[in-house]
Amino acid sequence: MQIKDIIAVSGVGGLSKLINSRTNGLLLEDLDSGKTKFYSLRKHQFTPLETVSIYTMMDTAELKEVFASMRNLEKEYPVPSPKDSNRLLSDYFENILPDYDRDRVYPSDIKKIIKWYNILADKGLLEGSDEEE
């Protein structure tokens, strides 16, 4: 899984790949269009996907673990559309990560994870094993 340099930018849909960092912002390449753009630190917040974790009842689960579970269980539990009902999304997430904290993980979080998974899967960034990192 290759999510090391993948970043979510506040106010911008989709995901971007880190090209370079500057003192006043980041130079990012949009994964959909392939266009490179500068994003200012004053205007945007940046979330590297490798730092994202999902609350569980005991601790947290890293996002790459959730993605790996989604990929491994995709034949048994096909990934739903982010536009499906909240109940369907919660049921799906319960199959993928059975001990996720239902009080702290909102339907909007599940929708965002599914959107990110679909983007990364379309770009082939979820292929390979964790040992490659």
Image (cartoon, helix red, strand yellow):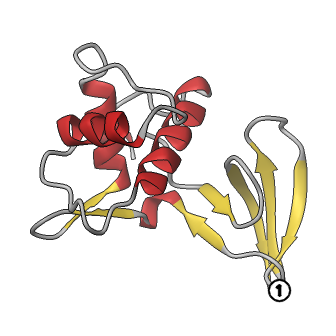
At 51% across and 54% down in the image, what residue appears?
4
How far from the left and from the top, in percent, is residue 11? 76, 64
Tally of marks:
1
Image position, residue 32 (x, y; %): 77, 35
* Rendered residue at 60%/34% (across/down): 119
User: In the visual, does 68 lie left or right of 22?
Assistant: left
Going by the image, does 98 lie left or right of 105? left
Q: Give 27 or 86, whichever is nearer the viewer.
A: 86
The residue singled out by tag 1 in the image is 42
Q: Residue furthest top?
A: 75
Kind of residue indicated by mark 1: Arg
Query: Residue 52's image quarter?
Result: bottom left
Return the residue nearer the eye: 26 or 117.
117
Q: Can see residue 124?
A: yes
> Which of the 4 image quadrants contains residue 130?
top left
State which quarter of the image contains the N terminus.
top left
Q: On the image, which quarter does residue 120 sit in?
A: top right
Q: Relative to 131, does residue 55 appear above or below in the rendering?
A: below
| Tag 1 secondary structure | loop
Residue 117 picture location, percent across and down:
49, 37
Q: Residue at x 79, y 49 (%)?
A: 29
Please state the horizontal and vertical placement of residue 56, each as a whole percent of the image.
Answer: 18, 62
- As displayed, is residue 55 above or below residue 69? below
Towards the viewer: 123 or 12? 12
